[in-house]
Amino acid sequence: MRLNKMTDYALSVMGFLLSHKGALQSAQSVSAHLGVGVASVSKVLKVLEKGGLVRSVRGAAGGYAVCLGVQEQSVLKVIELFEGPWGVMECEGASGCKIFAACHSKGSMLQVLSHVKNIFGQLPIKALEKEYTVLIPAVSVQVKKKIVVKEEIS
């Protein structure tokens, strides 16, 4: 499971905007600070704005800032704006899976995915502003396998 480059940029952009406590920041200033191209930063900002996480003000003194109340929303919202609903395995998606009935790993992998989503879902966006300690609970995944023993009759 890997987040795409634009998602990574979005998380960094949100952290940068949060650190400026509502002061408007231009796409150029975000770009310069993060070392990411202005075109990529502009695309990210447009998606974040459309998703209701940042607001923009036009004009010479304009720029972008994080919307009020966004800090308490989860990082999962940012991720899903760029990734869509994401999963580890095809069977978790809407399209289904051709080997679902015979699959031996779906149970354990879907449990792991659920835990990963819960971690991102519990992590507030304000955590992107600075170093933030995340306590990850111990995860126990049970793997159930059916064992068939064939006895040879002589």
Image (tube, helix red, strand yellow):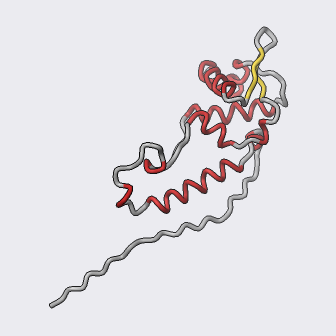
Q: Position of residue 82 (x, y in %)?
A: 58, 33
- Disc tally is 0
Q: Position of residue 12 (x, y in %)?
A: 68, 34
Q: Quadrant of residue 66?
A: top right
Q: Position of residue 75 (x, y in %)?
A: 68, 42
Q: Position of residue 10 (x, y in %)?
A: 65, 32
Judge whether 140 appears above or below 53 on screen: below
Query: Residue sitting at 81 percent across and 21 percent down?
Result: 24
Query: Residue sitting at 82 percent across and 29 percent down?
Result: 20
Determine the residue located farthest toward the left in the rendered image.
154
**Residue 85 vs residue 35: left or right?**
left
Determine the residue located farthest toward the bottom in the rendered image.
154
Q: Quadrant of residue 55?
A: top right
Query: Residue sitting at 37 percent across and 59 percent down?
Result: 101
Is residue 95 or residue 25 the one in the foreground? Answer: 95
Determine the residue located farthest toward the top in the rendered image.
60
Judge whether 81 appears above or below 120 on screen: above
Is residue 101 or residue 144 the one in the foreground? Answer: 101
Q: Quadrant of residue 57?
A: top right
| Quadrant location of the C terminus in the rendered image | bottom left
Judge whether 52 appears above or below 93 on screen: above
Query: Residue sitting at 51 percent across and 47 percent down?
Result: 87
